[in-house]
Image: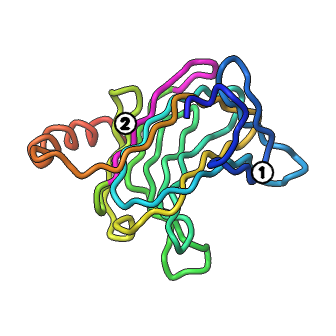
């Protein structure tokens, strides 16, 4: 979805105000909702590549939220301070808990377009910001069928465009690539 038109099926607005602004869809939190703005789309896959562009416009944070049949599964949290890859707590009732996989501190200024690419293969979770910064981790709870994806926005607004999803098995050379990419990502995280 290029997000150049108002949201329609398969996207479902759960909370907030969603409108087309400047050729992109903009989500804004509404105080009356007492919850961040959220839009979701259903998906049925285990191993995915997700790519989209975003622009912070006063938001405290935005997230790529990935759910499974039991609830929240994993996410990439984006703030002005950087990105966090995380395995989520399904229901906040235990016994599972949210676990940070990796935090990458990098400034993300308001008003600038950025591209996020997330690759999920089995238990592995890799988030790449602008083709440079990488947050990586692995958790057995991520290795399940996914049911939907969401774009939450906390605060003023965030714009989104060029949302793409592929079902994708890993390339044959993933082990060699991982041996190069992951240590470099660890050096950049704090």
Q: Is residue 186 left or right of residue 36?
A: left
Residue 81 in the magenta stretch? The answer is no
User: Residue 51 placed where, x, y %?
Assistant: 43, 36
Q: Which residues are magenta?
A: 108-120
> Between residues 3 and 53, which one lies in front from this camera angle?
3
- Badge 1: few (under 14), some or many (20 or more) residues near its Cα, within 10 Å? many
Q: Residue 45 in the image: x percent, y percent? A: 40, 59
For the point 47% across and 40% down, the residue is 83
Identify the residue at image location x=45%, y=55%: 86
Judged by depth in the image, the label closer to the viewer, 2 or 1, is 1
Q: First in sequence, mark 2 or 1: give its number.
A: 1
Q: Main secondary structure of the magenta part?
A: strand
Residue at mark 1: 15
Element marked by disc 2:
strand
Q: Is residue 112 above or below residue 80?
A: above
Say which element carries label 1: strand
Mark drawn on residue 104: none
Calculate the distance from the C-alpha at mark 2 to the C-alpha at mark 1: 27 Å
Q: Is residue 131 above or below residue 76?
A: above
Q: Quadrant of the C terminus?
A: top left
Label 2: which residue? 128
x and y percentages locating residue 167 in the rendered image: 35, 50
Looking at the rendering, in which quadrant would you find the N terminus? Answer: top right
Q: Residue at x 22, y 43 (%)?
A: 182
């Amino acid at each position: 979805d290029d997000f150049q038109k108002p949201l329609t099926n398969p996207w479902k607005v759960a909370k907030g105000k969603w409108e087309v602004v400047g050729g992109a869809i903009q989500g804004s939190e509404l105080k009356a909702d007492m919850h961040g703005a959220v839009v979701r789309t259903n998906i049925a896959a285990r191993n995915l590549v997700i790519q989209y562009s975003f622009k912070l416009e006063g938001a405290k944070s935005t997230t790529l939220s990935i759910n499974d049949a039991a609830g929240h599964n994993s996410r990439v949290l984006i703030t002005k301070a950087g990105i966090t890859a995380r395995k989520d707590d399904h229901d906040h009732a235990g016994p599972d808990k949210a676990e940070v996989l990796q935090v990458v501190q990098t400034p993300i200024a308001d008003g600038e377009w950025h591209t996020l690419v997330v690759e999920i293969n089995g238990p592995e979770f890799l988030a790449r910001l602008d083709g440079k910064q990488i947050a990586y981790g692995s958790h057995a709870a991520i290795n399940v069928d996914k049911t939907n994806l969401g774009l939450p926005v906390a605060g003023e607004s965030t714009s989104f465009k060029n949302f793409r999803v592929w079902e994708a098995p890993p390339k044959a050379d993933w082990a060699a690539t991982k041996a190069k990419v992951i240590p470099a990502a660890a050096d950049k995280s704090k």
